[in-house]
Image (cartoon, helix red, strand yellow):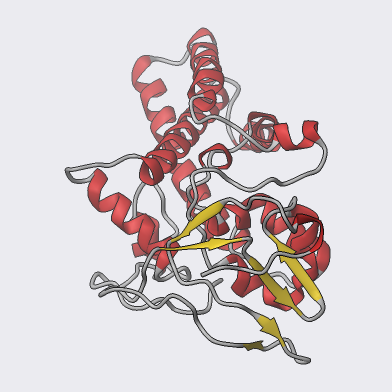
Amino acid sequence: MDGEEHGEGAGKKEEEVELIEPVRSMVIGSKGRLEGGWDGFGDEGGRRSSLIKGAKMVAQEFTVDLNKPLVFQVGHLGEAYEQWVHKPISSKEGPRFFENDIMEFLTRTVWWAVPTIWLPVVFYFVALSIQRGLTLPQLATMIGIGIICWTLIEYSLHRFLFHIKTKTYWANTAHYLIHGCHHKHPMDGLRLVFPPAAAAILCVPFYNLIKLLATDSTTPALFGGGLFGYVVYDCTHYYLHHGQPSKDPAKSLKRYHMNHHYKIQTMGFGITSSVWDSVFGTLPPSSGGKSSGKSS
């Protein structure tokens, strides 16, 4: 279906983007309710890939134009942001975030930057614990504990921070930058892993917290283990979106994560495993039902 050409974009050649789920022309009524119908009904799964040009969604008197930088637009959606951001558009070439080229550059990260930058840091902290007298069995134990702790952090951040509901301008904007953009454009390969600069900032409070709870010799190994867990997480996450696993467990893990994106977004928060989903009751039905329609 063809979207309308409007504003400064009229007359320009518009790029086509493939939709995993049908796009709704969303008009927000006076009370913030969605009005209008679905376009592009699908196949046996209730979804069909379709093409749109100049896609846009309307909220009250504001239009989100996908052909313009998005970050400072999405906040205007208000309460409608929650539904808008969970209607994914699948395109390997992601949208522009900022007008400023430097800010735009900082939002893009190739997946291999994560292991390239962070694995040497992991080895440094592991070596530091050895230097401080940790034996190999103790070292292995601390690294293992660090990895397990990361899996819980991974689950908690995804469930309670990345899927927090927002409705104000700046809250919507911040959420879109942190995680909303990934749900809106799940195949954007340059905005899938965490930018190293942001990760470095977050490392500081995590390290200081471990330092308060552990000894001088075990702190580096615990932190190194947690950091290694993060590297595995981000690389796994990228592979689940862009790899084509043919065997389990990778194949099942990909299906599990795609279920979170396209069917039941209120469940299935684990990326590297479903263990914590099982523990905390957010394991989605194995049969895979219809999309919840509401996301958290």
In the image: residue 148, left or right of residue 171: left
Where does the image place residue 159, in percent across and percent down from the top left?
A: 53, 61
Q: Quadrant of the C terminus?
A: bottom right
Where does the image place residue 95, in percent across and percent down from the top left?
A: 63, 48
In the depicted structure, whether residue 209 falls above or below residue 1: above
In the image: residue 29, left or right of residue 51: right
Q: Which residue is found at the position 52% from the left and 71% from the top?
A: 23
Q: Residue 281 sits in which quadrant?
A: bottom left
Q: Which residue is found at the position 75% from the left and 56% from the top?
A: 9
Residue at far front of view: 11
Q: Give the camera-side residue of 263 and 18.
A: 18
In the depicted structure, whether residue 220 falls above or below residue 41: above
In the image: residue 66, left or right of residue 257: right
Where does the image place residue 17, in percent across and percent down from the top left?
A: 52, 55
Q: Which residue is found at the position 57% from the left and 59% from the top?
A: 184
Q: Give the camera-side residue of 152 and 27.
A: 27
